Image (spheres, helix red, strand yellow):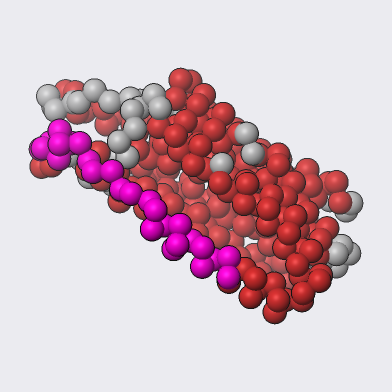
Amino acid sequence: MGAAARARGRILGFLAVAAPVGSILGGLGIGVLEDRLGFSGLWITLGLLYLLCPAIGVFVRDAPAPAKAEARDRASAASVRTAAFVILIVGSLLAAFGSFIGALGRSLVMQQTFSSAELTSTVAVSGIVTLPFPFLIGFLSDRLGRLRFLALCYAAGVAGLVVYSGAGVLWQFWLASGLVAFVSYVSTAVGSALTVDLVPRESVGRGLAIYSATGWGGGILGFAMGGYLFSVLTSAAVFLLGAVSLAVAILLIPPIGRANRAASLRGHLAGSYEPRARKE
């Protein structure tokens, strides 16, 4: 990504606003469609909407990398597998695991008592709650450092899962959903900007691809293990296990900063240090 260090959080945050906007539209519409058209009509409608994605992609133009970046010495670039980046990936997997535990548990618990429209309303509320934050936190992280905001997003997820563990009425599920959404809708923008900070410019595309995959990887683990856990444990216990997973992800954030500082110091001592933004 070619954005300047003090602008990339804002730019990635602006792009990440698409997620809460999509959840608002989906949360308000999907439950109504299912109630009126049934599941078959719902999936047909969604399939037709997905056809718009490749059509819109035709109008997207990729910007070529600056000539200066192309001419840089690739041999001197560090590997994408730096210690700080590896810790970020592990923490992101744990965070996504906890987030998807919340999403799965919410559906399993609410379908016993609430209608489809009420269940999907939690998705809309999560989008409304988080809508301004990807851009706002991305903007602030450019100036105040990324790690503290990543920790705050994960802490919101912990609070949301704790609320889920005792939720029984609709407003409690709204509150919990809004808090957990900070993990999936807001932290990813900060984490993507942090990834660009940590990896060499030549490896940014690969680094962002790896970081983005952690959301799906954690989701697969969350759904696979969550399905089993909800069948053998109480829902409250499983929600709290998800909260523990996010709490561990928070504990991994300070080592990211230490590893990044240590790598920068080693590069400086070796005479190969290149000034770059350190967002901690």
Q: Nearer the viewer, residue 243 or 110?
A: 110
| Relative horizontal placement of residue 83, taking residue 254 as reference (left or right) | left
Q: Nearer the viewer, residue 238 or 136?
A: 136
Q: Tell me, yes or no, whether the highlighted magenta stretch contains residue 69.
A: yes
What residue appears at the point 20 percent right and 26 percent down from the top-left corner?
Answer: 274
Q: Is residue 68 above or below residue 81?
A: above
Q: Is residue 44 above or below residue 258?
A: below
* Magenta highlight range: 48-73
What residue appears at the point 75 percent right and 55 percent down from the top-left corner?
Answer: 28
Q: Tell me, yes or no, whether the highlighted magenta stretch contains residue 132.
A: no
Q: Is residue 81 above or below residue 280?
A: below
Q: Quadrant of residue 9?
A: top left
Looking at the picture, how far across and down is residue 263, in whole percent?
27, 31
Q: Is residue 119 above or below residue 278?
A: below
| Relative horizontal placement of residue 48, taking residue 178 as reference (left or right) | left
Q: Quadrant of residue 29?
A: bottom right
Looking at the picture, how far across and down is residue 1, in whole percent?
32, 40
Q: Nearer the viewer, residue 103 or 87?
A: 103
Q: Nearer the viewer, residue 181 or 118?
A: 118
Looking at the picture, how far across and down is residue 144, in whole percent?
48, 20
